Image: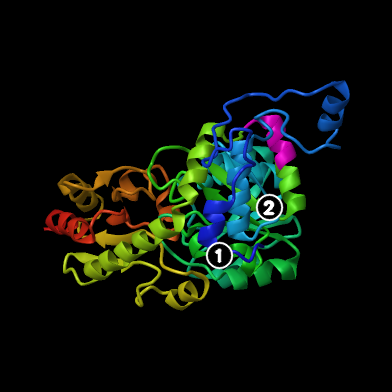
């Protein structure tokens, strides 16, 4: 890890300058790369010479993005994908064989839950869930064929927090891998590898881009594991496009300053909501009322930009609240400059079984707010009129 600070690494980690001496890294919109002669081509494909061969494998723009995230996370290596779910699936598909078992936190992104319940069973891969409020129960789920433990922290959409040090110690005790989705926190707020995680996954579509423009995903961690993920992805083709990598690499230059403001706005909004008579409960990692506040303070720099709360009236109450919103966006995305309001029970998790939703902390009236960079008073005013 470089001794330079986070913000400096984000800005000054760049691809090699070309003969044009550009200050800003150019776009490398090319599918392939050329070789001087047959021997260079042979040596390159034999991996005796390290260089770009084909943009499905690597590309200067993608390499720059990966290098930045590895430095931010303290990871040995990484591979970038076309989306966050491409990163999740490719990582799982690389690590798992038929007959393997996964232990996962019950509160995971809906699409990840779909992989565990709809597709992995047909490949004879089993998943057992532990409740986010009973992390100690995870140990009893570990079997001889368990390959890894998977968790999000903070979780989507319940904004629950899991103790990374505890999970790491548990995985080391049973000699299984720890894979963490760090999307809500970003590398600026939390570094799971420093707490013992083997692999860290991000949907770069969220705060890493920060402006709702492009899709992207990345997995970083131990070099020998990333090597296997690279070989799988080289064959299956889920790699990130050079253009998206260029956009995301630029976005990382402002990640720290953007995230600071997101968190400041989110804490103010969560504090306001907690005092509102029409709000049943509020969950935000840096609210003292959060059940895992002490753990959040221990492993996170700030609380992130996601606030969850419950309005009265169940599913219909949640729908009415969304219909009353005037300024904020109704969208399934998050981590945008613009504040986004989502009602999981009627949208992202509408098809998820009731007991699974309950285990993930998703109540009928729960609303997820991705707090943006507008003036916080304008965000509060919009929610105030919608609640009333």
What span is colored magenta in the figure? 230-237
Query: Would residue 201 be seen by someone viewing this image from the given angle?
Result: yes
- The residue lying toward the viewer, choosing from 167 and 194, is 194
Residue 352, image x, y percentages? 42, 46
Residue 58, image x, y percentages? 67, 35
Residue 85 is inside the magenta segment = no
The label on residue 150 is none
Pointer 1: what residue? 5
Residue 231 is inside the magenta segment = yes
Name the residue at 83% across, 36% down: 47
Separation (CA) of disc 1 from disc 2: 39 Å
How packed is label 1: few (under 14 Cα within 10 Å), some, or many (20 or more)? few
Q: Secondary structure at mark 1?
A: loop
Name the residue at 39% across, 63% down: 260
The label on residue 101 is 2
Q: Main secondary structure of the magenta part?
A: helix
Q: Which quadrant is the N terminus positioned in?
A: bottom right
21 relative to 107, above or below: above
139 relative to 342, above or below: below
Name the residue at 38% across, 44% down: 211
């Amino acid at each position: 890890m470089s001794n330079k600070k986070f913000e400096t690494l984000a800005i000054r980690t760049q691809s090699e300058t070309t003969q044009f001496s550009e200050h800003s890294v150019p776009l490398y919109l090319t599918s392939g790369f050329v070789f001087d002669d047959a021997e260079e081509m042979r040596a390159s494909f034999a991996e005796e010479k390290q260089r770009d061969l084909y943009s499905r494998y690597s590309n200067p723009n993608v390499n720059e993005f990966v290098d930045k995230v590895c430095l931010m996370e303290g990871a040995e290596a990484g591979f970038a994908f076309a989306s966050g779910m491409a990163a999740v699936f490719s990582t799982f598909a690389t690590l798992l064989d038929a007959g393997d078992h996964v232990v996962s936190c019950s509160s995971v992104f809906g699409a990840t839950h779909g992989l565990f319940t709809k597709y992995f069973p047909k490949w004879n891969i089993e998943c057992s869930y532990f409740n986010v409020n009973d992390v100690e129960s995870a140990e009893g789920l570990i079997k001889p064929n368990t390959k890894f433990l998977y968790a999000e922290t903070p979780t989507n959409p319940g904004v629950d927090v899991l103790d990374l040090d505890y999970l790491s110690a548990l995985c080391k005790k049973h000699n299984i891998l720890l894979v963490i989705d760090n999307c809500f926190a970003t590398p600026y707020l939390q570094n799971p590898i420093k707490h013992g995680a083997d692999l860290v996954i991000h949907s770069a579509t969220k705060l890493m881009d920060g402006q709702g423009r492009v899709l992207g995903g990345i997995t970083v961690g131990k070099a020998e594991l990333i090597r296997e993920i690279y070989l799988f992805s080289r064959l299956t083709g889920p790699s990130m496009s050079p253009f998206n990598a260029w956009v995301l690499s630029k976005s990382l230059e402002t990640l720290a300053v953007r995230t600071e403001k997101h968190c400041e706005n989110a804490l103010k909004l969560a504090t306001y909501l907690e005092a509102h008579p029409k709000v049943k409960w509020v969950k935000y990692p840096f609210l003292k009322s959060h059940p895992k506040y002490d753990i959040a303070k221990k492993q996170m720099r700030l609380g992130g930009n996601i606030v969850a709360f419950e309005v009265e009236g169940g599913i219909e109450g949640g729908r009415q609240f969304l219909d009353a919103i005037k300024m904020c966006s109704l969208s399934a995305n998050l981590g945008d400059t613009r504040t986004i309001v989502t009602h999981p029970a009627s949208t992202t998790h509408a098809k998820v079984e009731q007991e699974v939703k309950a285990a993930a902390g998703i109540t009928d009236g729960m609303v997820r707010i991705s707090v943006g960079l507008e003036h916080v008073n304008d965000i509060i005013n919009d929610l105030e009129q919608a609640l009333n």
